[in-house]
Amino acid sequence: MVMLTGSYCAYIKGQSLEQISQEARGNLRETRQTLQEMQRLLQEVPEGQGAQRELDSDKDHDGLSLREEIKLGTDPHNIDTDADGISDYYDTNPTGGSHNIVRILQWSYADQDWEVVVKIDSDLYDYYKNKRGKIGFGSKRSITTSEMLDHPTMKAVGDHILSIAETQGFNPVGMAVSLVQQLPYIHDNNTGYDSYEKYPIEMIIDQNGDCEDSSFLASSILEAMGYDTVLLKYPNHIALGVWCPNCSGSYYDYEGRKYYYYETTSPNWDLGQMPRRLEQETPNIIQINGQNGKPATNHTS
């Protein structure tokens, strides 16, 4: 079993979690001292338009006014007071106090059982869960797909799979997609949202999702592993497309490349296997880099 961490800040800075924690504690001590001094100075400022303008100002351009920063106890000169990679404006616990959410991803591949333990900061989960306007699949909650490119959690999971595949002689694409295929399928009607599209971080923590969620998670992991993928948006379904120059099965020509169909919602679907009901439909292509909505030019089985 391998323990992976999904700390955004740790990957960005190349520091350990302990170093990040020590640095954040030091920053918070300085922030509290600064805020105490600012509160004292503000009490000395005569009431009037000047003082109001000062309290309404946003020194670090994080969307919080000085008045709000003082109330929250955040640093008005630092967009990310607790150094967790999330702006104070979006952070559930902007001065610290979050906790790690641990999930064990378990799946079977090549007649063997595998697992990887992922730790994700609760503030990061809240950030994505509370974010609105997400994937861009035409729903009320449309995600910016490019936001998951090079995400540390996707990179960590992808690197772990690549390491196993290289040691065992496995197909890394098949192993990665099989992990996603074995997460429970849940229809949007059970979430309380209309076409609620989850970020990959959400699906890892929730450990369930529907077709767009599983396709986006698989795409994000594969992109982190170095594979070129697209999302295939049909009228009533979303699937994964994986570029492969010399594979077999059903694929779509797009931008000079062959993207092979990959079903992510249930186990035992292989690359190039397509449900019969989709054979006569032409999907729009959603690229993980954010270029959305172009129709596929040709389908070959």
Image (tube, rainbow, N blue to C red):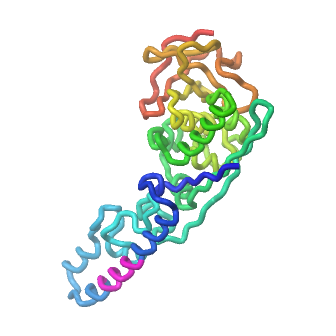
Of 89 and 207, which appears nearest the observer? 207
The answer, for residue 139, to whether it is visible in the render is yes
Q: Is residue 30 magenta?
A: yes
Q: Quadrant of residue 88?
A: bottom left
* Residue at x-position 51% and y-position 48%: 152
* Residue at x-position 33% and y-position 69%: 65
| Position of residue 66 in the picture relative to residue 141 (left or right) | left
Kindly give the residue lying farthest to the right in the view shown: 111
Q: Which residues are magenta?
A: 29-38
The answer, for residue 199, to whether it is visible in the render is no
Give percent across and percent down for residue 10.
Answer: 48, 57
Tell me if residue 66 comes above or below residue 276 in the rendering.
below
* Quadrant the C terminus occupies: top right
Of 26 and 148, which appears nearest the observer? 26
| Position of residue 87 in the picture relative to residue 300 (left or right) | left
Give percent across and percent down for residue 239.
Answer: 61, 28
Q: Quadrant of residue 14?
A: bottom left
Tell me if residue 184 comes above or below residue 291 in the rendering.
below
Q: Is residue 233 magenta?
A: no
Of 15 and 188, which appears nearest the observer? 15
**Prevalent SS, magenta region:** helix
Of 294 and 241, which appears nearest the observer? 241
| Position of residue 177 in the picture relative to residue 34 (left or right) | right
Give percent across and percent down for residue 292.
Answer: 45, 30
Give percent across and percent down for residue 184.
Answer: 74, 41
